[in-house]
Image (cartoon, rainbow, N blue to C red):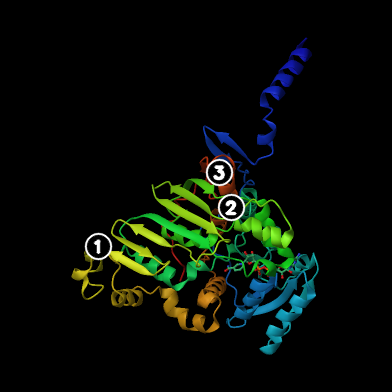
Amino acid sequence: MKKRLCALALACVAVCCIPDASASAKPYRIKKGVIVFDEPKPAAGQEDMLAFAAEPLATVRVGFIGLGMRGSGAVRRFTFLDGVEIKALCDLLPENVAESGRILSDKGLPAAAEYSGEDGWKALCERDDIDLVYVCTQWQMHVEMAVYAMEHGKHVAVEVPAAMTVADCWRLVDTSERTRRHCMMLENCVYDFFELTTLNMAQQGLFGEIVHVEGGYIHNLAPFWREYQGNWRLKFNQNHRGDVYATHGFGPDCQLLNIHRGDKLDYLVSMDTKSVVGKAVAKEIMDADEFANGDQTTTMIRTSAGKTVLLQHNVYTPRPYDRLYQVVGSKGYASKYPIKGYAFEPEQLAGAVVDYENLSTHKFVPAAVRKELAERYKHPILREVEEKAKLVGGHGGMDFIMDYRLVYCLRNGLPLDQDVYDAAEWSCIGELSAASIENGSKPVAIPDFTRGRWQKLDGLKFAK
Ligand SMILES: NC(=O)c1ccc[n+]([C@@H]2O[C@H](COP(=O)([O-])OP(=O)(O)OC[C@H]3O[C@@H](n4cnc5c(N)ncnc54)[C@H](O)[C@@H]3O)[C@@H](O)[C@H]2O)c1
């Protein structure tokens, strides 16, 4: 009798808990109208990586994986850095490895070990003479490679977005915390000149309290679609709705808002247009009739402290390049696109610019004042490296500043400017926005990748 009751109870539990078929395939549940993604449990004893500093490295020995358009540029930039040794180069295609090898020989640098083929990258990660693995492959491979590198004791720097799913964002966080290795996403736009200087102004209170920021990736990729190895990018977009490439616009926004350094991202809602140009491109290049990614995707985010963010993604239609970058504060405003400008309550600039009484918040400050401000509030990192960065280049120099800072912090045993939580927060927008769109723009809770420690650090600080 007892046995039969138990069986009945078990059957009842099983029936009651069967989720509907569509929900069971998804990595989230809808709770009180809000989409909530699954969160893994950390391993016992796992500690956070907030302000983590590793042992200083006199020389940073680096191995590069992925030597296409982006990776070969990174190799070239590294040849301009002091205190680095390029130990190994790897790409699926041997000809790409040979081409990057020539960058070294042309500069008279020692040859690096060469790897190619599907799995060459594993052997690179297994070497014992590498400190940093620098990953520039297509999106879908980032996490596998980053996790393997960390598991083999290496710090890892990984191109944007670091991960394409929320579960993979957690894998990066958990592996970094468990292995005590840095995992930095290579978000270069936070080092652009206007962004760095504006961040410095924000940190000195020029905008008062920032209440709203905007960021985007609006870049017509028509000239590039055929250049990605194996057509990986168009194929990915063909199968995914949402803001799949949010980090360039969102990274600078999160830095301005001190995300996981006092504030945290609460929830987002997202909406996309139908696909018109994307679909036509996919028809032309892949003879495909379906295309998931909308021509324009718009996402809104609210933070715990009551700030909002507007993000846009559009890599299809004919529009001038634009990352939005708008900063709305209680006492001032900054805008980078389509034209650079600042507006302030006049008293904000008392002592900072000569003729401040004649300013009005109805207009951008005159060009001469903007120039004066740019010089006065130039970020200390720019004062240090701007000239060389402009000479070396890489999106005008910001790419070199990023590499320079990464190597500087590793050599000096300092916390990196971008930590693994930044990588996860800025990358998770892809899958979260898709979930909102696929559910009629329902709100989606944004995971707290610090697991409750988002107030441990007080504001964003770049280590010196
Ligand atoms: N931060 C930026 O401004 C910026 C700009 C462009 C691209 N990116 C990012 O850089 C990454 C690469 O983009 P890309 O434009 O260079 O693409 P790409 O197609 O030119 O390069 C990808 C490279 O990875 C290689 N690869 C593929 N499978 C491999 C494997 N198993 N092992 C080793 N190598 C492998 C390919 O052969 C190719 O050379 C992407 O994540 C992209 O989002 C960032």
Please, what is the three-letter code of the amino acid marked with disc 2?
Gly
Distance, label 1 to label 2, CA atoms, is 39 Å
Distance, label 3 to label 2, CA atoms, is 13 Å
Q: Position of residue 88 (x, y in %)?
A: 72, 75
Residue marked by disc 2: 294
Residue marked by disc 3: 436
**Circle 2: element type:** loop
Quadrant location, the N terminus: top right
Within 8 Å: ligand 1 and the Cβ of disc 2? no
Please, what is the three-letter code of the amino acid marked with disc 1?
Glu
Is 406 situated left or right of 455 in this image?
right
Whether residue 141 is visible, yes or no, is no
Mark 2, Cα crowd under 10 Å, few <14 / some 14-19 / many 20+, is many
- In front of the other: 233 or 399: 233
Mark 1, Cα crowd under 10 Å, few <14 / some 14-19 / many 20+, is many
Is 113 situated left or right of 166 in this image?
right
Whether residue 261 is visible, yes or no, is yes
Q: Where on the picture, by quarter, is residue 326?
A: bottom left
Residue marked by disc 1: 345
Circle number at residue 156: none
Q: Position of residue 290 (x, y in %)?
A: 69, 51
Q: Earlier in the sequence, mark 1 or mark 3?
A: 1
Please, what is the three-letter code of the amino acid marked with disc 3?
Ser
| Numbered disc total | 3
